[in-house]
Each structure stands twice: as structure tokens, then as C-alpha cells.
Image (cartoon, grey):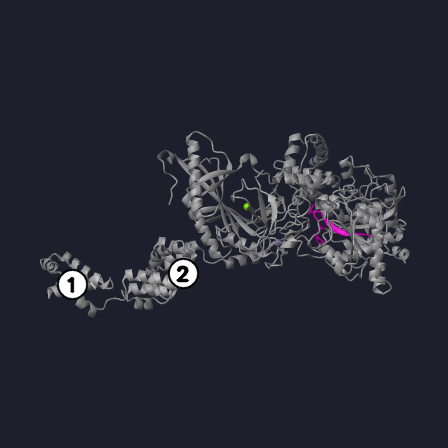
Amino acid sequence: MSEELLGLTAAEQAERIAAGELGAEEAFEFWRDRAAGDDLGAYLWVAEDAPEGAGTLPPIAVKDLFCVKGVPSQAGSRILEGYRPPYTATSVRNLQEAGARVLGKTNQDEFAMGSSNENSGFGPVQNPWDRERVPGGSSGGSAAAVAAGRAPWAIGTDTGGSIRQPASLCGIVGLKPTYGAVSRYGMIAFASSLDQCGPLTRDVTDAAILLRHLHGKDPCDSTSLGIPGELPLPSAERLDGLRFGVWGMEEAGLEPGVAEAVNATLACVEELGGSVEQIELPNAKHGIAAYYVIAPAEASANLARYDGVRYGPRAAGDGDLTSLYEETRDDGFGEEVKRRIMIGTYALSSGYYEAYYGTAQKVRTKIAQDFSAAFEKVDFVVSPTSATVAFKLGERTADPLAMYLSDYYTVPMPLAGIPAVSIPCGLSEGLPVGFQIAGPAFSEARILDAAHALEKSIRFEGVPVG
Amino acid sequence: MTTTVTEPESRIYEPVIGVEIHVQLKTRTKMFCGCALSFGDEPNTHVCPICLGHPGTLPATNAEAVHFALMIAMAFECEIAPRSIFHRKNYFYPDLPKGYQISQYDIPLATAGRLGDVRIHRVHMEEDAAKLTHTGSSGRIHGAEASVVDFNRGGTPLVEIVTEPDLRSASEAADFGRLLQATLRRMGVSDVNMEEGSLRMDANVSIRPTGTATLGTKTELKNMNSFRFLERGIDAEIRRQEEILRKGGEVDQETLHYDPQSGNLSTLRSKEEAHDYRYFPEPDLVPVAPTEEMLGRARSALPELPAARAERLERDLELPAETARLLAFRSEWGDFFESAVDSRRELAHNVANWTTNELTSRLGDRELADTRLEPAAFAQLVELVAEKKISAGAGREVLDVLIEEGGDPAAVVEAKGLGRAESGELEGIVDRAIAENPDAVEKIRAGKGQAIGAIVGAVMRETKGRADGGEVQRMISERIRA
Amino acid sequence: MIERDQVLHVAKLARLRVSHDEVDKVAGELSKILEHVETMNELDLEGVQPTSHVVDLTNVLREDVPRPSLDRDTALEQASDATATGFRVPSPGAS
Ligand SMILES: [Mg+2]
Ligand SMILES: [Zn+2]
């Protein structure tokens, strides 16, 4: 039955469980063994035996930075090594209450800072399509696990592309919901005004099901709203009358193979009755600059609590408080995290605030205005998710800026707070290419419907798993 | 009361003082989490993942804290910001679990108010830090080896009140503090207890040549835990600055600690060590934009405040201004007084005098609440004296009893036989006194009226002061003329 | 462009260590990133409102109702240096 289960989407498995054709425990055991057998470095922890919960939905792989009571939750960082939270994140609890039990904690870039998962404090993750390549990041473990059939589905977080980019590089579906759709309570923070939790799944329907259970207003998160109205499962097969605005196809760094796959998808849009036009997002090119001020600035404060006093490992120090702080943080944080704390601290320090943080916040406004203007003319803003396919492990680690620039297509949406999905749309050099569909705030249902129609006609073949 | 200007040569300087007050709000739960507030409970028993700054936690603003803060802003006649926001104030310290304090910065809840004749610069909301206990001999920071952190206090709702530099002496600063304390206590938004730290006062002190408008370099005096120490500390700092300036030196901008025992001022932080707090808007919280409903609720929750109460007592009960102020600024005294005169307004003056003189002097630092004295009984006592049923001296004796044992004044008078000596009893005593003082009688008959004093004195001695001097005098003259 | 002493100052503010032989490398990396960041200044941002929240919410307030706290052992459980009742640290200012 293993082969059979691997061939099914999470939704199909849920149907069998509901119909009594598949036992909840049987399903959990199967996926537990699959997770335990992972050799990609996708997991940091795998559940020993079935935890509490109905199990009416297939078990879920959860990015390490989600706090789960009593379960290692380390955000991929040595500074939280062995940390077991006394509470559970609202998003995870929502899934548990819906019947999905936690299968394991997945590897990630430390504190979600990275685009290749190479910044994990616990080692890199291999891309199942080519083990010499990165799975993307920061939700690299979740993406690789789902792509390799090591998890039926997973959740991750997206701050500047951390769900969509790894989904793209691993050939699966990744959705970043509207900011405020899903509670951030219990999500170990990177950049609070950008972080959003979302699904990484085999197909669009699975993503919609997870979103249904994840979203909602949470009294523990003052910035949460939930998604107003119904979230029907995506069913569209056509795109009649829908207008798609394309941007970024002239970018220098865009690989020809990626452009080809995206253009083929645009042709597909027209076949399904949709229309395609070029649009401008004049300020999008400044997204990276604004993002790499705002995110590090917020992170520099969010990561100040890691001082070795209340939890996490503590360095010996030289007996005084300052050396204890510095040594604990020096030992615990990786290079990239330190780099971003430095940038953020500098950007907020007296005399520089306006020049950096103040300016970045204004750029953020301009980018949001670009999208509002675009949505006057079109229903969706589409682009490649990533300029390139999965790159080689170590290829970009030497050059932080080059790594940052790989977020080019995914950074503008979180800056504007709007939702976007990445769906696999073909191969380039035998590696998956992602197609990104963004819509106005809270247009998740429409985005997923469009993604569903495209998915049906693209018929992307996932990686063969064994 | 100490005064600033003592040595003649220092008269050329004028102190310029502003105060910063932190007030712990008396809500049920903390500012940003559901932990119950506590004082003196077992360490770390009122903590949760949020107030311990655990990874992934988020703050959720306490509605009642906002309500109390709005009441305070209104009590000070402030302009309330239509939309105020929280910032993160970043610095590392073991009593600050998140590595930043959530506070208000460039858009505080309220600005531009006043209390008495002192202008209020701003009123804002923030969260309190935890409690660090320094182990080792002294409780002072320096020298202690290790410290233990108790997060029970961490996250307690605070309102910070900053005045303009309108105060001109240590005693003015202390008086302002007392008015502020009386006002907030009356509002019931805080315990305003300086010893327990629910009211904390810092003072910014500078001096300048009298008559000039320029502001000198100011120093900050931290955390004085009583108004007496506040006053002494400011005085000491003013003297210190005067000496520096008189020697032609310059005052350094620094933060100082005043030790009431030694009377010494020690540097806590110099300007060089001044923090770079890297304030930025708290992304986990949304703006506070008080609605008409919120404002209305705060407005209607405001009781009569001490300043207004003093006016009313002066106007309605025709009390002297100083007496009215004394009663109004210590609301427990005011409440006691008002319930005492409740049904007998004609006694207002006497009750007021007995309250502000006899009662206060008897209690000293002791709280009214710790006595057995009932307002009604107090009023009856004052009435007995007013109607000359007992003498003032006897009244004081009865008061002492009522304070310690409570009860009904008439009964006490009875039990102690303090009632007026009746004329029947008096006649005998008077006759005897006359008989025993023939020469005084001679003098009186010779027109030396004042000689009667000797006889009156004899009667008073005999009656242990229970007789009424006027009546005794009348009886004596009657008899002598007859 | 960020200078050596700025790097050291920022490291101090952030309680991070930058050894003296790292300073130039770090200054170089940060400067390169900041150089890109400063391309924002090409934009005319006259009169543009800054965005710090994308959600348009106000007065999200919690009722003042106590919720159970952690028991102390659970609270202290994760600390590397706890006494029976609290979290131990070297005293600030002591050394
Ligand atoms: Mg303060
Ligand atoms: Zn708490």
C-alpha cells in the first residue's frame, strides 16, 4: 500500500480515512516511517509515536520555527538547541484540532534568514531533484520533504519568499497568504511585519484545505484578521475573462529556461480563456533594498531575547554579564544571522534611522501603490517565482548580496502584504520552474482557483519517489 | 521643611526642576499578557511564555490599562492623541526579557496637560521591567556577585508622566508629587505606594543664574522612594551643582543615585554611557485610536479630583483654603471628614479643625485606617466639646481612647467621669475656694478684678478641669458682691 | 559605506563579537550590502507616507481577565542557570 499512498494527495488520503478505507494510525505510521527514512536532511525531529489528535487528516510536517509544546522548536538555530516550548503555536493547534497530527519538525535556514537552507545551524538540505543542489529556503526542509514524498504536506513561513521560492525549486505548490490571514502566535519571529505562515503541498487543493484550517482571527495576535468570507475548494478549469499582468520578464538574471517555461504557462493562460498583458511595477526593483533594511531591523530586535538567561544554551562568559551575552550570542548565531543583526542594528542606530529604516518604509508604501495600480487593470500579477532553477550547494554562500538578489520576484508581495502562490509550471535543465500568481489582499480563493485551472492543464509530473 | 537657598553666595542661582513619574496601574492583569498582577508573592509564580519573552510569543494590549491611562490623561487635562502607537525601546538587561521594552515614543497617548500649576509634557503607556535581586552583602548594584531575576513584576502596566521643567525648588517638587499621588489615589488607578514602587519619581535638575532664561546642564536623579528623600536628594544635587558652578566648574550630564542614609550622590551612568535605544514602531501591535465610546467611558469614570474637592470644601463648607487643601489632598482624610460632617454640616468648621489639628497630630505617620475611630463618633466628640458638654482637654483624652479602642464618645466621657461639673457640685467647691482665699477676695473687693484668677484656678484644680471657666467666674463674682 | 569603528560600535550595541581581524571583512560585506540598499535614494519619496503596518487595524485590545500562569518549575525548566525560585545572572555592573 506504500506505493499507493505515495501516489495520493493529502486530500485523497483524507477522503480514504473518512471513508474508513485507511486507518488514521496506519496512515500516521506509514508517514512516520517515510519521515524517519529521510536522507535529505529535511527533518530535524520526527515524532516517535502518534501524538494526541484524531488523525482524520494526514499528519503534517512543520517548519522548525513553529512552537510545539514539548517538541524541539529551534528555528534552525544553535542558540535554541534543545528548546522545548511550554506552548503550541495557534496555527499548529488549528491543524491539530482539524485532525492533522505533527509528523516532524523540518529543517530551515536559521531564523528563516536565507534562500537556500544552507544557513541552518543543523546542516543543509538536499534538493530531491538533484542532491547537489539546494532546495531553496528558508522553508527548505518542508519543501524537500513534500517533494520527496517524506511528508504528505507541510507548513512553512514566508517573509521575503521563504515558502514560494523553495516550493518553486522543489516543484511543489507554496502559498503565502495575505499578511494577517494566519496567526503568527507561536511562530518564532524573523521580521514581524512581514512573516506569514502558509502551506507547502503536492497540489493546489491540498494548499486550499490547509489554508482553510490555518486562517482565522487570533486574540493572541493583534495583527491577525483571518480571511473574510468562504474558502471554497478550488474547482475552476477555465480562466475566461480573467486578466493576467506579467512583470519582470526582461530581468537580466532571468534564466532562458525559466523564461521559456513561464511563457509556455502564459500561453496556457490564453488557451484557458484568460488574457495576458505586460505590466509595470516601477518600484519593485527597489524591493530587495527596502526588504534588506526592514527585515534585518525588525530581526535585530526580535533576536535580542536570545541571551541564554531564560532558555537555550548559555556560554560560560568571563563572569560578567556583557561577556555572557556576547559569548552566548556569538556561539549560538550563525554568520548570516549575525550579518543581518548587524545591518538591522546599524539601520536603526541614532543618526541613521531616517536614511535607512524611514526610507525603506516609504519605498514599501510605493511598492504597495504599484500593486494597487496594477490591480486596477488586471486580476492577477504573475511572474517567475525565482529567476533561476535550484542552484548548486555552496554556489552563492560566498556572496551574500547575490543570495539576497535571488528573492527579487518574491520580496515585493510581503512588503505590500498581499497573497501569492507558486505552482510548478515545467522543467528547465531537468529542474522545476515555479510560476507565481499574486492577487489583492484576501484574494486567496481567486488565486487558488486560477492556480487550480492552470495546474489541471499543465499536468506537472512530480519527482518520482521511492 | 528644607529650603534650597541657604548660604548667601548661592542666592544667585535658581533651580530648574522637571520630574518623570512611573505609575504602576492597578489592573487585574499585566500590560500585554494574562498573568495576574501581584506584589510580594513567591518569585516567578506570575509568569507565562509572553512575559518571559519566549520565542514566538506576541503581546496583546490590556484594554483596562488603556482605559486607566486615558483617565489619567483626562485628569491632567491633556490633549489625547487621535492615534498613538507603541515603539520598541531596545537595550540589553536581565530584567528585560525581550531585549526591548514596549513603550510609546514619538506619538504618546497624551500631551500638553497640567496638574496644579505644573505643566504636563506627556503621558504614555509602557510595560514594567522585572525585579533583579542582587545577592551578596549590599542590595546596591556594584559589588554584588550574582543576581536573581523575578519576572512577577515584569510586564506590569505603567503610565509614565513627564512634566515641563516648571518646578523651582525641592519642596515644590515634593508637593507636586503629593498632589499627583493624591489625585491618582483618588482615581483608584494605582496604589501609588512609593515604598512598594507603584509610584516612582525621577527628577531632572539644573540650576541657572536667577533671572536668566537659559537652561543649565541637567542631571537625572533616579528612583527616590519617598517624598522626603526626593526633597533631600534634589536639595543635595542643587547644592552640589552650586558648588561646582561657584568653583567655576561645569556640571556633567549624568544619571545619579541619591543614598538617603549617607546623603551621598553617586553616578549611575555618565553621558558617554548613554544608550542608543534604536526606537522603531512595534510591528506586533496596532495603533490606539480612542473612540468616542472609550473617551466617554474614561470621562465618566473620573471622580472629583483633589484640586476640585478643595475648592468645593472652601466654597460649600466655608472652610479656610489651607484646611480645605489639607483635607482634599489626602483623600482618606477628606473622606473621613466628609462622612463625619455628613449629617451635621453646622459642625463643619469644628470637625475640620479637630481633623487637621488634633487628629493629624495624634496619628503622625499612622494611617487612619489602622485606628478604631469612626467618623460618626468623631463628629459626636467634636459636638460635645462645641456644646461645652466637655472641655477641650477632656475631648483630647476621649479622642485618644476612640483612636485606640473605638466606641461611643458619650460612653467614654461617662466611664472616665469627664463630664462637666454640675452647678450643684460646683457651689460647694466655689464656696470653699472663696473661704480659702480671703486675701484674693479682699483684692477683688478693692477693685483688683484680675485677682479672681487665683480662686478660679483653685476651683479648676479641684474639678480637674471639668468645670467651665466662664461659669465658675460668674458664680465667684455673684458670691463676692453678695 | 561603514567604517571599522562603526562596525565595532554596532557589534557592541547588538551584543555580538567581531574580533579585530574580522572587522575589515565584516565592514566590507556590510558596505557592499548597504551600497545596494542605498539605491533606494534614487527614488523621489517627497511626501510619501511610511508603512509600518500593512493591516489597517486599531484598538485591538484584550479584556483584563487573568489567565493561568506557568507553574514555576516549568518556567525555570529551560534555563541553564536557575535557582529554586529564579533565573541567575551575573550582576549588571559587576565584573
Ligand atoms: Mg519609562
Ligand atoms: Zn505573563
State the quadrant of the N terminus of chain B. Answer: top left
Of A369 and B299, which appears nearest the observer? B299
Of A290 and B142, which appears nearest the observer? B142
Looking at the rendering, the stretch of residues picked out in magenta corresponds to A179-202
Q: Is residue B209 above or below residue C57?
A: above
Q: Amino acid at mark 2?
A: Thr
Q: Earlier in the sequence, mark 1 or mark 2?
A: 2
User: What chain is tagged by disc 2?
Assistant: B
**Residue B392 lies in quadrant:** bottom left
Q: Which residue is mark 1?
A: B433
The verdict on residue A278 being magenta is no
User: Ligand 2 quadrant?
Assistant: bottom right
User: Cβ of disc 1 within 8 Å of ligand 1?
Assistant: no
Of A370 and B295, which appears nearest the observer? B295
**Residue A103 lies in quadrant:** bottom right
Query: What SS does tag 1 mark?
Result: helix
Question: Overall secondary structure of the magenta stretch?
Answer: loop
User: Mark 1 vs mark 2: same chain?
Assistant: yes
Of A458 and C83, which appears nearest the observer? C83
* Number of residues whose C-alpha sits closer than 10 Å to that of mark 1, classed few (under 14), some (14–19) or many (20 or more): some
Q: Which residue is mark 2?
A: B371
Q: Is residue A398 visible?
A: yes
Q: Is residue B138 above or below residue B370?
A: above
Residue A180 at x, y percent in the picture: 70, 52
Q: Amino acid at mark 1?
A: Ala
* Number of residues whose C-alpha sits closer than 10 Å to that of mark 2, classed few (under 14), some (14–19) or many (20 or more): some
User: What chain is tagged by disc 1?
Assistant: B
**Residue A290 lies in quadrant:** top right
